[in-house]
Amino acid sequence: MEDIRIRFGKVVRQKRHKIDVSQEAFADLCGLDRTYIGGIERGERNVALVNIEKIAKALRLSVPELFRGV
C-alpha cells in the first residue's frame, strides 16, 4: 500500500484540479506557501492537522470528505 502522504497528496491534487485552480492560487486560498502545497501533492510533507483543515476549507469540503479516497 502507498504511503498515506502520497495518497493524500494525490487526492489534494485531484480535488484542486477539479475546481480548476493553479497551485499558486490554491496556496493563496489556503494561506500556505506554493512550495508547501507542491510538497504535499508530491507526498513529501507530513501535513499538520491545522493545514489539513485549511486545505479542506479552500476546497469547500469537510475534513472527512477530503479524506475519502485516501
Image: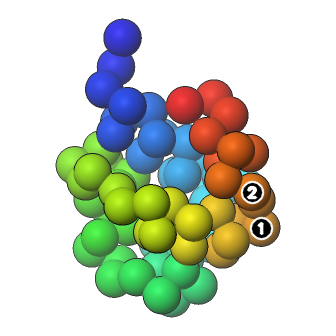
Q: Secondary structure at mark 1?
A: loop
| Of the pair 31 and 50, the residue shown nearer to us | 50
* Image x and y of residue 61, in percent: 76, 59
Task: Name the outermost residue toward the front.
Answer: 49
Residue 16's image quarter? Answer: bottom right
Residue labelled with disc 1:
60
Residue 57's image quarter? Answer: bottom right
Task: Name the outermost residue toward the left.
Answer: 44
Q: Residue at x 74, y 57 (%)?
A: 62
Q: Secondary structure at mark 2?
A: loop
Q: Nearer the viewer, mark 1 or mark 2?
A: 2
Crowding near the residue tagged with mark 2, few <14, some 14–19, many ≥20 C-alpha atoms within 10 Å: some
Q: Amino acid at mark 2?
A: Ser
Asked if residue 22 lies left or right of residue 48, the reply is: right
Q: Any mark on residue 62, and which?
A: 2
Asked if residue 67 lies left or right of residue 3, the reply is: right
